[in-house]
Image (spheres, helix red, strand yellow):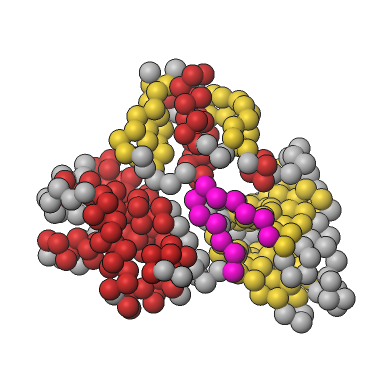
């Protein structure tokens, strides 16, 4: 494996470095305004990989301009540095700083057994014959033992279709999240690490047992229902009428959805920032959209709604009023 290929493998997605390079190149050209600083902060909080890429960018910036280490949200340099040059330097920095690279390699996402980049989806067969589908920007660690079949959801969203234990030991099938566990009861279900400090679970066949970390008992969730839970409690379930998640078919389905909410969901499938101007946030739309071409989805919005798409860079897009 080449050094550049090794970096792509280690980071989980070359696009994260590319985005960090775009941010750094912009910040070196001029001061970021308040809105841009807020957008950069949101990008950094998107995942651990994003924050690590930004810290590498800051280290590169300090090498360029001697910026103090305590400066984090804003970069003060003024060199008109090309994004490609910044990206090349970031790649070099990752290999030139062994300690930082080692930390990157040992990040939870990087050490996952299965992972997808932003906009990527994947289907894999598990050792026991069960099927695992990973949605965009997802990572899973496999922890099978003689006692149980355990998947650790590091980040993102997965669809699990379980089968009886092929080892013949009737081991329980468990998905562990940062908020608790979801035990399969012969079933097909999704588990998603949500951005609001909860885990979401949707059951398509049979049932699961959901148990928050701080709960004494598990809560049964049957097919056709979904719920969220945090580390202490299970929240009320609601009905869903899907036969399988739309993303597993490469689709994003909208039913009379607010444009802002729709774009927030679409942003999961494309690198960079996708913003919605508050002036058009309450517009409603319905439809079935193909996730393999998110640029085309944005074009369709301009054809069906009174909006237009502003592209500051390929990674910085805002939907505004037309």
Give the residue displayed 42% in from the left and 21% down from the top. 307
Relative to residue 118, is residue 306 depicted above or below? Answer: above
Left or right position of 133 against 278: right
Magenta stretch contains residue 129: no
Q: Is residue 117 visible?
A: yes
Q: Quadrant of residue 39?
A: top left
Q: Quadrant of residue 65?
A: bottom left
Q: How many numbered marks appear?
A: 0
Q: Is residue 45 visible?
A: no
Magenta stretch contains residue 119: yes
Give the residue displayed 41% in from the left and 53% down from the top. 15
Give the residue displayed 16% in from the left and 66% down from the top. 63
Q: Which residues are magenta?
A: 113-124
Residue 67 in the image: x percent, y percent?
14, 62
Q: Residue furthest bottom?
A: 146
The foreground one among 233 and 206 is 206
Give the residue displayed 15% in from the left and 44% down from the top. 30
Relative to residue 180, is residue 260 depicted above or below? Answer: above
Left or right position of 257 against 215: left
């Amino acid at each position: 494996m080449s050094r550049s290929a090794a970096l792509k493998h280690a980071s989980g997605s070359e696009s994260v470095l590319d985005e960090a390079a775009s941010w750094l190149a912009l910040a070196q050209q001029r001061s970021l305004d308040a809105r841009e600083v807020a957008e950069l902060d949101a990008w950094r909080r998107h995942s651990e990989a994003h924050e690590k890429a930004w810290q590498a960018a800051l280290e590169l910036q300090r090498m360029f301009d001697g910026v103090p280490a305590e400066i984090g949200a804003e970069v003060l340099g003024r060199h008109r540095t090309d994004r490609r040059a910044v990206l090349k330097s970031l790649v070099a920095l990752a290999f030139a700083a062994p300690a930082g690279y080692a930390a990157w390699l040992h990040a939870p996402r990087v050490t996952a057994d299965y992972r997808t980049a932003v906009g990527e989806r994947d289907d894999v067969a598990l050792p026991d014959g069960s099927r695992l589908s990973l949605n965009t920007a997802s990572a899973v660690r496999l922890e099978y033992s003689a006692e149980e079949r355990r998947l650790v959801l590091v980040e993102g969203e997965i669809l699990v279709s379980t089968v009886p234990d092929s080892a013949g030991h009737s081991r329980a099938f468990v998905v562990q999240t940062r908020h608790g566990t979801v035990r399969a009861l012969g079933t097909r279900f999704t588990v998603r690490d949500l951005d609001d400090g909860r885990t979401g679970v949707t059951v398509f066949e049979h049932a699961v047992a959901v148990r928050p970390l701080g709960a004494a008992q598990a809560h049964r969730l049957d097919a056709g229902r979904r719920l969220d839970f945090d580390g202490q409690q299970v929240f009320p379930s609601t009905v869903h009428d899907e036969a399988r998640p739309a993303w597993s078919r490469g689709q994003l389905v909208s039913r009379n959805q607010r444009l802002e909410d729709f774009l927030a969901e679409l942003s999961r499938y494309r690198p960079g920032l996708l913003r919605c101007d508050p002036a058009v946030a309450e517009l409603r739309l319905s439809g079935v959209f193909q996730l393999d071409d998110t640029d085309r989805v944005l074009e369709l919005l301009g054809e069906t709604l009174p909006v237009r798409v502003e592209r500051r860079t390929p990674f910085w897009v805002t939907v505004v009023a037309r």
